[in-house]
């Protein structure tokens, strides 16, 4: 059960109530009860008997997550749900700011430093890459997933938005690699078997999320969220490595056009 009195808590609980209530069965937790009164807001969710994936990561876990994300990609967003591009811009379009910060430039892999103009051009396609009419989780990480009876159940829905299918995938895979799982490009193949597009098709999102992680990990700590910057830095390393590999030579060995 989740309860809230602070303004942010009330907002996020109301958003989660709306999002979880419209999910198909077994995609997320089901709603047992919800209350919204002058005294506060409460959400009672199904207790899922499951485990977080990883420790270690297995092909079975990734296959279960891929199957669930395929279902999510077919779930129409309700009318009135905020669009992903309205929430994720400018947060996920940080290459111009990175280019102007010597500290951030110095820490980038050398091939990315040499491709800042290309990265800014890729960034111009970010809005179009996000636009769609299905539900986007917008905060998908291993700790927001439970594996239960071979199914992946997705948790923590207050940031759900209307957007394009599969845009959660580029944001999930750096957390998989950072926590000991396969490299992002290797894990992607499992998701392609469940209908995901090519990595190049979602390159603006891969690039955008890498810029988000790298920019934010260098920002001042937030006292209410201890460890956030270290968490973002941990994911930024595989995200930047992945982006570098896509720009300098995809799996077939030929450079991107």
Image (cartoon, rainbow, N blue to C red):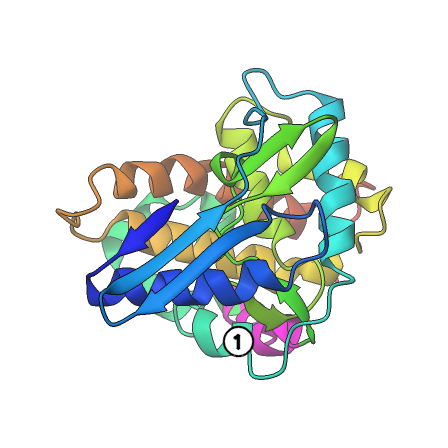
Query: What is the quadrant of the N terminus in the image?
Result: top left
Report which quarter residue 227 is drawn in. Answer: top left
Camera sees residue 159: no
> As drawn, which residue projects farthest toward the bottom?
80
Say above or below: 193 vs 75.
Answer: above
Q: Which residues are magenta?
A: 118-131
Residue visible at 30% across and 47% down in the picture? 217
| In this rendering, position of residue 7 left or right of residue 206 | left
Camera sees residue 38: yes
Say above or below: 176 vs 210.
Answer: above
Nearer to the camera, 9 or 201: 9
Residue visible at 34% across and 61% down in the picture? 98
Residue visible at 69% across and 76% down in the picture? 133
Looking at the magenta stretch, what is its main secondary structure?
A: helix
Q: Indicate the position of residue 163 as horizontal and vertical percent values.
A: 63, 71
- Where disc 1 sits, the SS reads helix
Say above or below: 77 vs 41.
Answer: below
Report which quarter residue 211 is drawn in. Answer: bottom left
Query: What is the quadrant of the C terminus in the image?
Result: bottom right
């Amino acid at each position: 059960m989740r309860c809230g009195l602070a303004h942010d808590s009330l907002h996020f609980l109301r958003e989660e109530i709306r999002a979880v209530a419209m999910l198909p069965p077994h995609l997320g937790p089901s709603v047992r009860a919800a209350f919204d009164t002058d005294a506060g807001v409460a959400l009672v969710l199904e207790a899922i008997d499951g485990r977080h994936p990883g420790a270690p990561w297995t092909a079975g876990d990734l296959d279960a997550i891929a199957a669930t994300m395929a279902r999510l990609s077919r779930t129409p967003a309700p009318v009135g749900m905020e669009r992903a591009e309205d929430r994720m811009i400018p947060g996920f379009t940080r290459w111009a700011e990175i280019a102007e910060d010597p500290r951030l430039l110095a820490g980038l892999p050398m091939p990315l430093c040499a491709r800042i103009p290309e990265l800014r051009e890729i960034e111009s396609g970010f809005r179009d890459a996000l636009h769609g009419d299905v539900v986007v989780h917008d905060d998908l990480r291993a700790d927001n997933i439970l594996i239960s009876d071979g199914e992946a159940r997705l948790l923590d829905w207050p940031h759900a938005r209307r957007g394009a299918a599969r845009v959660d995938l580029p944001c999930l895979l750096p957390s998989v690699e950072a926590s000991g799982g396969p490299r992002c490009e290797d894990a992607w193949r499992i998701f392609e078997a469940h209908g995901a597009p090519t990595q190049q098709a979602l390159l603006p999102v891969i690039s955008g999320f890498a810029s988000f992680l790298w920019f934010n990990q260098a920002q001042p700590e937030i006292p209410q969220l201890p460890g956030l910057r270290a968490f973002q830095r941990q994911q930024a390393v595989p995200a930047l490595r992945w982006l570098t590999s896509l720009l300098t030579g995809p799996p077939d060995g030929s450079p991107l056009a």
